[in-house]
Amino acid sequence: MYISKNLKCLRLDRGLTQEELAEHIGVSGQAVSKWERDECYPDIVLLPGLANFFDVTVDYLLGMEEISEKEKLQNIYPRINELYEQKNYEEAAELIESMLKIFPSHPILLGCLGETYALMGIETEKAIQLCEQGLEGRSYKAKGTIYATLCMLHKRNCEIQKAEKLARSLPHTCESRELLLPNFLKQPERDEYLREHLPGILKTICILIENETEFPEQIYCKPNDFDPIEACEKIAEFFK
């Protein structure tokens, strides 16, 4: 729940102390202090009175609207990935642009849009600008994706030194989620995870060896469209 944060913001907007709010609703100042520190919640019978006092809904007070918006945002990423897999980048861009109207300046969405523009092969400068805006967010995962996109955008923009400098600043392979996480999973989850993610790693290596594409798209490997044995043979041949 977001009630602690919302209560504090509403109280401060009214210019009230915790004691003054407590007096208005008939509780102790200590109770309000505990609510705002998220140590406990107001009794359910107090919620309508609190909502009426601040002229908001109970849902707003509890943060249900914010939770609903976050769920809406989380549900959009599988659809974006599906469109990427279909190489339907135009529809993906339209979807992300519509979400940015609801969540303006959202760092992950900005990075996604920059990546989508890059995959479309247009708007290189705009894609770079969007990615750089996305880096202002705090999501480690989002930043990793954005950095990778920026590297390739700089290459496309004939700024090889920028791309190389940025790439050299990134973590090495052993620090990736795909190679770290299996160390902490128990069977059979560990093997399931490896079977799901190793094909993507192998396919990426094959793409590097063959240098097939200017801009490496996100790797979407399914068991029925990728042969890991063939990939291993190709990698082994490269090291002969």
Image (cartoon, grey):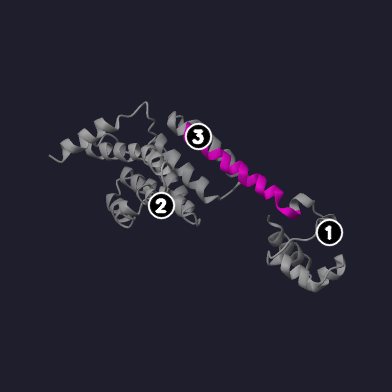
Q: Residue at x 77, y 73 (%)?
A: 30
Q: Is residue 165 magenta?
A: no
Question: From the viewer's perspective, is residue 1 above or below residue 233?
Answer: below
Check contact, mark 3 vs mark 1: CB within 8 A. Answer: no
Type of amino acid under label 2: Phe
Query: Callout 2: few (<14), some (14-19), or many (20+) C-alpha neighbours within 10 Å?
Result: few
> Which quadrant of the view contains residue 188?
top left
How far apart in space, not on screen, are marks 2 and 3 (Cα)?
34 Å
Q: Is residue 39 visible?
A: yes
Mark sitting on residue 87? none
> Which quadrant of the view contains residue 175?
bottom left
Can you tell which of label 2 and label 3 is closer to the viewer? 2
How far apart in space, not on screen, are marks 3 and 1 (Cα)?
45 Å
- The residue where tag 1 is placed is 46
- The residue where tag 2 is placed is 184
Type of amino acid under label 3: Ala
Quarter occupied by the C terminus: top left
Q: Position of residue 223 (x, y in %)?
A: 37, 29
Q: Secondary structure at mark 3?
A: helix
Q: Between residue 29 and residue 14, name the one nearer to us.
A: 29
The span shown in magenta is 61-82
Residue sitting at the far front: 187
Q: Position of residue 35 (x, y in %)?
A: 73, 65
Query: Callout 3: few (<14), some (14-19), or many (20+) C-alpha neighbours within 10 Å?
Result: many
Q: Secondary structure at mark 2?
A: helix
Mark sitting on residue 92? 3
Check contact, mark 2 vs mark 1: CB within 8 A. Answer: no
Q: Position of residue 55 (x, y in %)?
A: 83, 55
Q: Position of residue 132 (x, y in %)?
A: 44, 52
Q: Secondary structure at mark 1?
A: helix
